Amino acid sequence: MSKKILFVMTGADHWTLADGTRHPTGYWAEEAAAPYEEFKAAGYSVTVATPGGVVPTVDAASLAPDVNGGEEGARRVAEVLAGAEEFKRPTGLADVRLDDYDAVYYPGGHGPMEDLAVDADSGRLLVRALRSGRPLGVVCHGPAAMLAAVEEDGGNAFKGYRVSAFSNEEEAQAGFADKAKWLLADRLAEAGADVQVGEPWAPKVVVDRNLVTGQNPASAAPLAVELLRKLSG
């Protein structure tokens, strides 16, 4: 039986700020590349799904040496993404059958703040994945997608779950806290999630039932390891 993991990724190439300007963005390279490598090495195939089936855009800033531990790290991440054919042939999110996959993973980047935060198809998928008990991993700004996971009664499916996500302090240090329409950690708390964050930029992974969340790019690789642990358990 084939082993399959679904990557749900942003289709946005910009993030609309509070003043209406469009900040160029997309998905964050490390958050896609590191788990991709972990999953492939463990024998899993990867399918990428985006809203409308558009090819996801990598945030150019996430390819810079200073966020990848230097030139060698930046080169490695770029090579992984360039060789990942799945990222070039995404399926439409509306066409996804959850039963076809063993686990679901959402990388971040500011892109999800633009589209997945209000995407009904993604929201329904998250509700089903959470209920199914299959491992569900979401990292950094990926948890913006949780805001669209609304139950029949209008409440959020992640209410009462312990989650991590990009912190207000990290958003401030990145230079966007005073430019954003809203802050992710605040919105998740308003939706009823128990938001847990650690030191800025340090790895932090939170596990609650079948949900595994990570705070920032450095959390992506350890999150993938935890997902694989759940899959093999």
Image: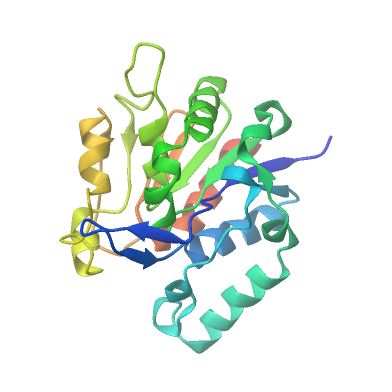
Q: Is residue 108 left or right of residue 50?
A: left
Residue at point 23%, 49% (across, down): 183
**Residue 61: quadrant of the picture:** bottom left
Q: Is residue 136 left or right of residue 47?
A: left
Q: Is residue 97 above or below residue 2?
A: above
Residue 42 can be seen, yes or no: yes
Q: Is residue 122 above or below residue 36?
A: above
State the image coordinates of residue 105 (x, y, percent, origin top left): 55, 44
Q: Is residue 42 above or below residue 129?
A: below
Residue at point 84%, 34% (across, down): 1
State the image coordinates of residue 93 (x, y, percent, origin top left): 61, 38
Residue 228 can be seen, yes or no: no
Residue at point 55%, 63% (across, down): 57
Residue extending furthest toward the front = 20
Q: Nearer the viewer, residue 161 or 185?
A: 185
**Residue 207: quadrant of the picture:** top left
Q: Nearer the viewer, residue 201 or 181?
A: 181
